Amino acid sequence: MAHIRNRRKPMAQINVVPYIDVMLVLLVIFMVTAPMMQQGVTVDLPQTQAQPVTEEPSEQIVIAVDAQGRFFLDEDGPDGLPMSAQALTNRVADLLRERKEKQVYVRGDAGVDYGRVVEAMAALQVAGAESIGLITEQPEKKQ
């Protein structure tokens, strides 16, 4: 009598239960973090390295935030008085109504609280500024 060998074929199945657990954990993490990502001020970020601004100074609206967190409008000159966020919104809205092609820039002191710069950007967004740029200085090259 021929002895018939009963060979077991290898199973080609993947156990997906651990992957489902990982997927559910990731789903919960994304559901919790998604509402946090919705807040913030929309800013047009440059796609390349920063280049010097080529616009005429008369075509710009520049807002300065000094080290104490006060808001100034560069158009007022060196004798300009600090203003509140609401006053800044009203002034910039008036300027934007007069000149639609204006580019708006924020020049913040390096020592100022980041929240004050964001507050200025939010006030500019309420005023109707569609794109807001940040003015920086070129770093000095070390010898």
Image: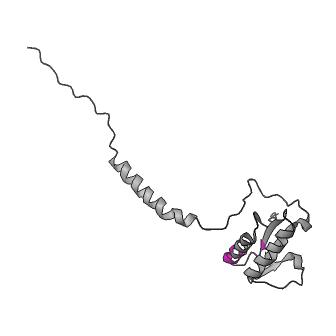
Q: Is residue 120 above or below residue 80?
A: above
Tell me which corner region of the image, top left, top right, bottom left or bottom right, holds residue 88: bottom right
* Residue 29 screen position, x and y as percent: 46, 61
Q: Is residue 80 above or below residue 34?
A: below
* Residue 130 screen position, x and y as percent: 75, 63
- Classify the position of the N terminus by image quarter: top left
Q: Toward the viewer: 129 or 73?
A: 129
Magenta run includes residue 117: yes
Q: Is residue 136 visible?
A: no
Q: Residue at horizontal 84%, vertical 72%? A: 95
Q: How many badges with numbers are in the image?
A: 0
Q: Is residue 24 left or right of residue 143?
A: left
* Residue 120 screen position, x and y as percent: 73, 75
Q: Which residues are magenta?
A: 107-118
Q: Toward the viewer: 48 or 2?
A: 48
Magenta run includes residue 28: no
